[in-house]
Every structure is written in C-alpha cells, then in structure tokens.
Image (cartoon, coloured by chain):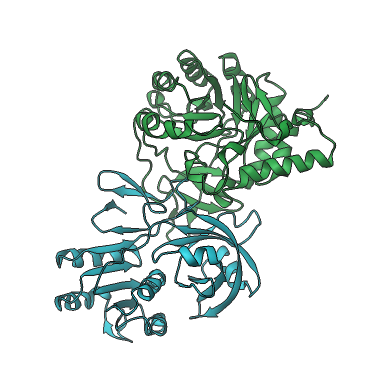
Amino acid sequence: MPKTIVEAKVIGQQILSKDVKLIEVFAPEIARTAKPGQFVNVQVSKQAAPLLRRPFGVAGVNYKSGTFTMIYRIMGEGTKILAELCSGDIISIIGPLGHGFDLTAKHPLLVGGGLGLAPLLYLAQSFLKKNVEVLMGGRTSSELFWQDLFNEETLAMHMTTDDGSLGTKGTVNALLPQLLETGKYDCVYVCGPVPMMKAVVKVVEKAGLPCQISLEKYMACGFGACLSCACGGVGKRLKVCTDGPVFWSTEVEEW
Amino acid sequence: MVRALYDNRLAINIGGLKMNTPVTTASGTFGFGLEFQDFLDLEKVGAVTVKGTTLEPRSGNKGQRAVETPAGMLNCVGLENPGSDYFLQETLPKLKKIAVPIIVNIAGNSPEEYGELAKKLDVDGVDAIEINISCPNVKQGGLAFGTCPDSAVEVVKAVKANTSKFVITKLSPNVTDIVEIALAVEKAGSDAVSLINTVLGMKIDIAKQQPVLGNVMGGLSGPAIRPLAVRMVYQVAQAVHIPIIGMGGIMCAADAIEFFLAGASAIAVGTGNFSDPRLAETISKGILEYMDAHGIQNIQEIIGKALPNR
C-alpha cells in the first residue's frame, strides 16, 4: 500500500480525560486503507520547532465519512499544539505507515495499558461480530475511561487497577493467567508500556498462545529512513516503523 | 544517465559530476533513496547520497537513538547498515534503474578499511564516493579522523588510491578550524568537500537525571545548526578551489540559496527529509521561483555571490 502525505482537515476533538484527547480528521485516502495497528505521522506545525512529526496509532476509521481518529496524551510541545487545533484546521499527515495486526483470530484477547489501548480500539472495531474481549490496566479508575470506548466494540471487558479502585487490584497480569486458563482465546494482542508488554508476553507464551505486540520507539521519519527505531529481530535487524510496529512476540529479541 | 529536467537552468557539473539540480540529499537522512519513492520522483533530485556504508554490516548503537531538540534533533544511530556486500548485491541493482547520480557515503575504522571499501565500490552504478571522516580512528584512541588534518589526509589518500570515482570528503564541524581540514583534504586529492556533518551535542532527561541518548552524545542536525553551516561554507569557499556541497538545516529554497551565496555549488537536504519527504523536490521548484523573481538565468550566477570581493 503506497504511503501518502495528505493535508487533513480536523473534524473535531473530544476530551477523554484530564490529559487525553481524541482527534478526528478527514483524510479519505488514509481512512480507506489504514489497517488496525498501522500508524500515521502528524506534522503539528509548519515551523522549525517542533521539527519532527509525531507518530500516532490509528484508533478508529469511518469509511463512510472518510475520517479516522487518533487518541493522544498531552505531554510535550507537539501534543500541546495538537490539543489546540479546532475543527477546520489543516494538518499534514503521512500514512498509513507500518504493518498492522494479524486479523485471523477467532477468539482474540486484547491486552492494553495507557495509550496502548488506542490501536487496540481500532483492532476491536475490526473484529466486528467476533468474540473479542479486552483486558485493560491502569493505575486508578479514572485512567480507564477507555471502558466507554471499548464497551460497544467488545463482548467482554476485564479491568485491573494498581490501587484496586476498579476491577481486580494489580497489573493486568493479576488477571491474565486466570483469563487464559479458560482456554477460550486463540490469540493475544498486547500494546502498552514495554515492561507491561514483556510481562504479558511471558505469561501468554507460557500458556502456549500466539501473541502479537505493538512496539513504540522514538522515530524521526516513520518510513524507514532514519533508523532511530531499529530493534533486534531473530537473526536480523528490524525497523519498528516499517517491519512493525506490530510483531509476533517470537520475532523480536531486543526491544 | 541523467535525463534533462528543470529546463536546464538548475543543471550543474561539479568537476565531472553532472546533476539536473544542485539539490541533493544528505547521507543518513534519505535511507537508500528507495524509502522515498512513494513521496517523490527520485529523478528530480540532483543526486541521491545513500546511508553510510561500512565494509561489514553494523547493528548500530543501543538505547534511544534520536531525540528532538530546539529546531533540531540529536541522533546516535551509530552507522547501522547492512554492509557493503548487501549494498552491492541488493540495493545497487535497484538504484541503477533510476536515472539519478548515486553517491555512496562510506565509513571505516582505519585508512586501510576506507581504501578497501572504496575499491569494492568502484563499480558501475556508483557515481561518487563521499567519505565520512567523522568516524573514530580506532588505532589512535578513537579520535575522529576528521578532527586532525593528518588523519583526514590519510583517509582521503587511501580512498583516492583505490577508486576511479569522484571523491567528496564530508567535513566535521567539530573542529577548531575547518578551513585547515578543507585545505588538507583538497591537497590530498579530494575532488569536492561537503559540509557540515552533525555537531556533537547532548540532552539530559531531568526526570531520570540521565542522558537521553543511549550513546550519551549524538549529532545535532536541523535548522538549529544552519547559521553555523553557512558560516563554515563561507569560510571554506574562500580557501579551497574544489566544489563545495553545503548542508546543515536546509528546510526550504531560501535556506538553500543562502548556501549558494556562501559559495556552495550544490546543497543537500538532510533532517528536513524526515519532516517532509518531498522536500528535495520542493526546494528545486522554490529555487526556480527565486531565479525568476531575480532575473537569474542559471544557478551558477549566484554561487559565491555573497563572498567578499565578488
């Protein structure tokens, strides 16, 4: 699929929590072709600073309206500018980039934490009418505003919080082993902070299930030129931007 | 073979290296060129300078390799590349199908290694060699070849003795007197110089209280270094007689024109390729607009025009 650079029109933004927003943009070329797990690289400003684009996973698409959404946390200079955009503003977006998730699972379990839940939301959406379940972890209940988004797309939602304010107390791994014991899943998809993903991969591999991980590494270009996001694959070097960001857990060694 | 484009007003010939436009791409920011084919027509770029190639494959540095800084970025990729055999067997045949001069940037640990690599790359399809002299000289305590005239000369001589190609030496700005190095490599036989390479820099994460980059220090690039680059081109242009390829934070045609006025015969787009992968093509168009607005018939008319006594 050719990558394109589009001047996308902002449709609107939605506040999801005190520092997380959802932005919807009109970009039919990307909305029509982006697969779950793929990402886009957004130029938040035409000025010399911030200089580089910001990568965001596609959080959902609407083929009919030609729009897609991204979910981001307001963290630095780039996301602050993004958060100020209004409907009608134009931003340059390169996409779709990278390779998406494998979509052949019959009974998928999606495991995510933090902004890692954004690409999983689009993944859940594309498993339409299938038995998709999600396990989401956060520090406290207010971080799991994701329930409202996943509720319509999934058959069941499982929650964990570090402080026990919602769902099972602990990390996702406090609940994951017993979910896997039911034997109903045939593939686990995980996206979130690296320590969480590594811990999840361990449990899933031990249970003998295939596991797909979506990696995030600092990248300057997003299309394979800068090598900032290179990682160690089995027997070869891989680029998170073009070989990933989604990998089978057995494909990558050093990440 | 190069097809004539841009109605020849941008065409240049720097010491035998013919280009349709003086707008080239900087090594390490343009992959092998092929990564950009979805975005621009490679034949509309003056020359494609490919990623730094070493004799053997290199996996590069561990840890975080890039970080954005004010109007720039730091990188410590560490010359990750698939090695010269892979380049010759897999990449070069694909590049040969594109009618654009190919400049191969090379790096090594010793003058002998540079020489061996130059010999290996002395093949059809490679139009020029660009020597990265900013690599550490392993035998002499890791000091970069490019920081001292003697070691820079050794590398240039080793390359020149082993190739029939046009040789460009890429100068490091991390020196007290870049003119001294430029004069030395010119005397050693370099056919051209390109400048500047990245400026050594660093960033510290104040939450972790640790350096951000895995390699601690990295090369600063982007608009932040442009005034430094323009100044160095201006100084070198007054000293050497070989052509200069200017680079450092070029983001638009106006930036490129500064470099021509300072004495560069060609320029390279670097970090700007990451923000806008079409930039190398866009800049050529912008230069033509500037030429129209200023009644300039050929780009050569403005090369070095800002130099004293011109």
Position above or below: B24 against B141: below
Image x and y of residue A218, in percent: 44, 55
In-front residue for pair B152/A229: A229
Judge left or right: residue A134 versus residue B202.
left
Q: Nearer the viewer, residue A147 or B158?
A: A147
Give the residue at x 62% y 39%. Answer: B248
Extreme residue in the right direction = B295
Q: Which chain is green?
A: B
- Which x, y percent locates residue B83? 37, 32
Picture residue at 50% right of the left edge, 51% below the top: A221
Can you see residue B262?
A: no
Residue A84 is at least partly visible in this image: yes
Chain A: its colour in the image is cyan
Q: Quadrant of residue B288?
A: top right
> As drawn, is A175 to the left or to the right of B206?
left
For the N terminus of chain B, the image quarter is top right
Percent from the top left, x then y, of residue A171? 28, 75
